[in-house]
Image (cartoon, rainbow, N blue to C red):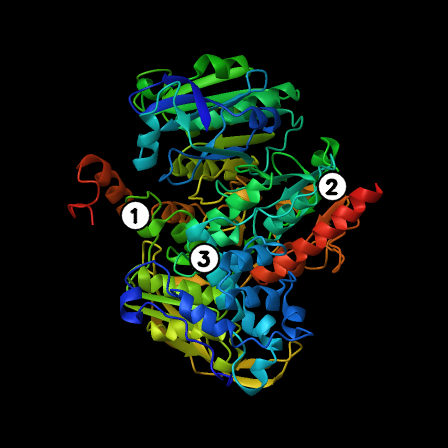
Amino acid sequence: MSQVKIKHEMPLQDAGERIKNFTEVALGYNEETAVAEANRCLNCKKPKCMEGCPVEVPIPEFISLIKEGDFKGAINKIKTKNSLPAVCGRVCPQESQCEKHCIVGIKGEPVGIGRLERYAADYELQHGGAKPGQKQQSTGKKVAVVGSGPAGLTAAGDLAKMGHQVTVFEALHVAGGVLMYGIPEFRLPKDIVQTEIEKIKELGVEIKTNYVIGQLDSVDELLEEGYDAVFIGTGAGLPYFMNIPGENLNGVYSANEFLTRTNLMKAYQFPNYVTPVKAGERVAVIGAGNVAMDSARTALRLGAKESYIVYRRSEKEMPARREEIEHAEEEGVKFALLTSPTEFNGDENGNLTSMTCIKYELGEPDASGRCRPVPIEGSQYEMKVDNVVLALGQGPNPLVPRTTEGLELTKRGNIAANEETGATNKPGVFAGGDIVTGAATVILAMGAGKKAARAIDDYLNNK
Amino acid sequence: MYKIVRKEDFSSVTKLFEVEAPKIAAKGKAGQFFILRVDEKGERIPLTIADYNPEAGTITTIFQEVGRTSKDLGKLEAGDYLVDVVGPLGESTEIENYGRVICVGGGVGVAPIYPIAKALKEAGNEVISIIGARNKELLFWEEKMASVSDKLIVCTDDGSYGQKGFVTDAVKQVADEMEINKLWAIGPMPMMRAMAATTKPLGIETIVSLNPIMVDGTGMCGACRVSVGGETKFACVDGPEFDGHQVDFDLAMRRLAYYKDEEKRAEAATTCGCGGGCGCHK
């Protein structure tokens, strides 16, 4: 069979249409396309793709099952390693993980592994019937998982399969962490997240919402109360601001607030849902990562006439996934590159009206390897804006670190943990995900949760 | 689900709820707050904790019906349930024996000042409490405050009960007569601003408790940021108590007013009966 060089295209909702709604942009393969895409896989003896997968999904095996039309078999195969396949199939940066290593990708485009994972996962969501995963006999050990984001959910699912009794503590009123409050509905439907969480609960995992560790109980108290180990996956919860004048004007949001109001609290359905959010006629998002793209695209859907990405470096340095940038461009998001605000200006009621920007040029590479942006003297100009969303990244949430006695932290306030095991300096306390690495991706957090689950299992067996 | 075990109407707009939340009742301390949601479509609003009953496993909160959510809340009765209750949130009050202290509660601010006065009294302080309201109808918990205070002064703006005038006047009178080591003032933002302005020239250390708009209440969103001594703080994790002489009250008040128009629309959505379809509250 001749090799098709190009990945089968993902059908999308039309850009003009989709900016008027919050329903999913990428529509997913149909059966025919899925099988055809699966047939592009060479089923390599030494599958390089798996080296790129932090949660060790048996990629060629599940793709082979799709080739045979055994979609149920495919999802069961994925679920031996990955508890959140419908999530990963949508939001993993496959181009820098599994697909980056794909042999087919050398002479053409790699196999659409993520799209196939999504197809198998969605097949199960529609048809049901997958096994909840193999569960070992109960060990009688209790593990507390702090935070129900990707790291916590993965650790919880794996630990439950290993036979441990797992309780997840979540501060918000719903489980899922960033999957619920951060990533927009149009990229990751919340029903899908909740369905995958239900499957994890079917493994015997208990999830306690409205339970803030660090306030209601400390990590030390969890250990005293009879948990044999604790996994901390509290994420990168503290938004960075710029510390420039006018930052506290009404209308300046952190991306966390803007997205939480919209996604978690469903402000896009205001006033049917009571939480409001504002996106005036002109919205500027500062930053160019995935969260910035999500914010700029959300602003359009909330009714903004113009939505800008304002970024102090050039297009090449934008940290967002290519796909997200393209989707934003298609939808009409504008890019003000080599530009950054120096001041936010407001009216007499303290409402934002404009921002003063300065232009940059690129200088020598800095410590991060990226060219350092240098401000151009005298290039200031004023940009009218009704809302600004700061998407500059996040620091570690302080609640757990500051209430856990003797827990070793890094200089930045993240939890110091072993990269391979998640072990902290405190016996029985493990950590993983953004609280350790700083803001990263869903799949890296999941990988950390998986490694920590294995290390916790070892720890409990030897205890 | 969190059961409302007791409701008390203090006035047509001021209500008390005692809510089942055993873990918060056991762990919470003076100065902390909680967040609730009335129902599945509700917003998350922070409310102060006015009392803890660890034996009964309940917390008490007192609120005033001012907008959509507090009005929805006010419609609930004993036996009804709140869909979400999370807490205790924020840092607790620094309780020590300071000597002689004043605890001021204005309006619904009497609710959160009560556990603080109680804890300060238990720590050995001489507690002078001053509570005030616009009129007699809006006053509550006079006896309860008296029970944790060495002296209690009651003021109403219109003179319909107690001494006529503002709580700031009462503070000045007391400070004229004796030395005050520290003061806590909780109430509406303009009252706390006036209090800070009153005590600054008197040199009395003044702690206020801020109630900005919040979403998560755990430091994640930054909606509640306030400026204290020129520095941005998150009221949910750095507060809610701050040095009153350092707080930028103008900023805090402007930020509280940001969703005024949406508040009206959210309220209209419940009163016109169209359920959002008629366009009357666009």
Amino acid under disc 1 = Phe
Mark 2 or mark 3: which is in front?
A: 3
| Image-quadrant location for residue A305 | bottom left
Rendered view: A29 above or below B71: below
Q: Residue at x 48, y 67 (%)?
A: A115
> What type is the residue that disc 3 sits on?
Asp
Indicate the secondary structure of the residue bearing disc 1: loop
> Residue B86, image x and y in percent?
51, 35
Relative to B192, A135 lies left or right: right
Residue B123 image-quadrant placement: top right
Q: Secondary structure at mark 3?
A: helix
Residue on which disc 1 sits: A270
- Horizontal side of A204 relative to A182 (left or right) equals right
The Cα atoms of the two marked residues, 2 and 3, are separated by 34 Å
Chain under callout 1: A
Instruction: Give the mark toward the camera: 2 or 1.
Output: 2
Visible residue check, residue A426: no
Q: Are marks 1 and 3 on the same chain?
A: yes
Q: Which residue is mark 3?
A: A122
Q: Tell me, yes or no, whether the two marked residues, 2 and 1, touch with CB atoms within 8 Å.
A: no
- Which element is circle 2 on? strand
**Disc 2 to disc 1, C-alpha distance:** 42 Å
Q: Can residue A177 be seen by looking at this rendering? A: yes
Residue A299 image offset from top left, x and y in percent: 35, 62
Chain identity of mark 3 = A
User: Which is nearer the N-term, disc 2 or disc 1?
Assistant: 2
| Residue at the image position 35 percent from the left and 18 percent from the top | B10
Q: Residue at x 49, y 84 (%)?
A: A5
The mark that comes first in sequence, 1 or 3, is 3
The residue pinned by badge 2 equals A229
Disc tally is 3
